[in-house]
Image (spheres, rainbow, N blue to C red):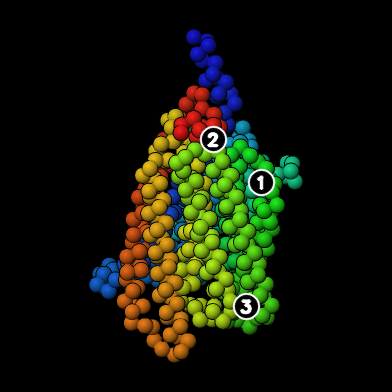
Amino acid sequence: MSTTTKPDTAAESTAPDPVWRYASIMYARGAFTSLGIVLLAGLVAALYYVPWIQPHLKATGIDMRLLEPLHKTFAAAWIFLGGMALVMRFMQDEVKRASRGDRLRLRISVISLLAAGIAILITIPMGITSGREYVPFHPAISPLILIGWVAFGWTFLRAVLPKFWERPVHIMMWTVGVPFFALTFLEQHYYLLPSIFGDPIQDMRVQWKACGTLVGSFNLFVYGSAIFVATRISGDSSYGYSRTAWALFGVGLLNSFTNFGHHTYHLPQSSAVHWISFLVSMMEIIIVFKALSDVVRLVGRTMPRPYTTAQAFLSMSKWWTALMLVTSILLSYPPINALFHGTYAITGHAMGAMIGIDTMVLLGALAFVLAENARRERGSSAIIDSGRMRALVIGTNLAAFAFVIGLHVVGGAVGLNRYVGLPAPVWSEALKPWVFAGAGALTFVFFAILVGAWLRLAFRRMERKLVPGMKDAATEQNATA
């Protein structure tokens, strides 16, 4: 009898504290729920562009002006919460035992962010907003978000600050991203100061600067998550110290402070600001493409064929990055930007970056976490790495591609006609319902099937005991292939 219990005892003694895995899943639950809200708000907004549906939506009191704030707020929440889930997955490897303070701070973080999410979900549909574009919820909710973030960041920084300068680049990215978000979040509330709000030009400058650094902060979490998952799956930590990874960190951080120049061509500003913004952004996206190519190659050396879901999403993010590089070069050129700014072409570019790069990377990273948990609890990751899931990856990307390209075409037509003083072409107006309600609804369907399946997995009751004999992620993958 004693010989049969020894492996379980040894596994339990060396296993990470379950609180880290629980925290990772809790943040993942929040991330997938936020993504679900984004999808629902986006679908209803898309249906507004169908002429015979729009009157019925208006009759029910659904206001397009309130759907957009919900969509944007929870899109940002999806990115940050997904990154936080990956950070907690890292904590499983870094800290075997959570302290009493860690447990308390994680409870505070989860409860505060949950309360903020519920408050936003209730108040925005009621019309209780800030009236701002990028922090549209009422400022009374903001302290909850800041408390939740500080509690999370404190737990993470307490673990990584010892031997900080020896850490790989993804730890540096997350470490900088933690205070970076807090600072830019505060900066987004400068409009509450009368001296800022009373000067419209200064207000717009600050708003776009804060928005740029916010994007920069969540990019650090996304990039760090991709590199962490690649090194964790492959068992090769050397890429975390590579020149490409460090270049991505440096240029990504620099671009956080300069990328606002893409959006302020219409303000009194030096042309040097625009050129610096253009050059730094192009450098970043080129390095992102190289880094994601390296990540896909690194993961591919270890993972079996056919591709796992994690691999499939990471691979798609690489090609989306290439597409966004082309559109970024075009839209960042001032004369072209002047044509298309304020049209759906800019919306398409933003959607392409959010869906194609940030979301695909996070879905790949979270697929790794869910597959790992499935192997630990069931002995197999088939529920994540199935042929059905890989088909969903392909369908989701094709639908999203059609949606993004459609937005570029409609916006481009409007911009060109506006330049010569003509109204929007009739064909572009006729195309709108097909782009929004057609490709948009199809994108919703694929994402909804995927998110619904993963939400069910994330909300399953977690088993404390692991399947006996399971090893690390790379070994487990090869064992189940």
Which disc, if any, is residue 473?
2
Q: Which of marks 3 and 1 is nearer the N terminus?
A: 3
* Residue at image mark 1: 240
| Horizontal side, residue 198 vs residue 414: left or right | right
Residue occupying image coordinates x 55% and y 24%: 12
The percent position of residue 351, horizontal first and vertical second, equals 47, 64
Callout 3–callout 2 Cβ contact below 8 Å: no
Q: Earlier in the sequence, mark 3 or mark 2?
A: 3
Three-letter amino acid code at the position of disc 2: Ala
Camera-side residue of 297 and 188: 297
Q: Which quadrant would residue 427 be assigned to in this image?
A: bottom left
Please tell me whether residue 173 is drawn above or below residue 214 in the rendered image.
above
Three-letter amino acid code at the position of disc 3: Gln
Between marks 3 and 2 in the image, the one whose residue lies nearer the viewer: 2
Residue occupying image coordinates x 36% and y 68%: 435
Find the distance from the CA under tag 3 to the CA under tag 2. 50 Å
Please tell me whether residue 298 is drawn above or below residue 350 in the rendered image.
above
Residue occupying image coordinates x 58% and y 57%: 289
Find the distance from the CA under tag 1 to the CA under tag 2. 18 Å
The percent position of residue 93, horizontal first and vertical second, equals 61, 36
Q: Earlier in the sequence, mark 1 or mark 2?
A: 1
Find the distance from the CA under tag 3 to the CA under tag 1. 40 Å
Camera-side residue of 61 and 399: 399
* Residue at image mark 3: 202
Furthest residue toward bottom: 421
Three-letter amino acid code at the position of disc 1: Gly
The percent position of residue 347, horizontal first and vertical second, equals 46, 70
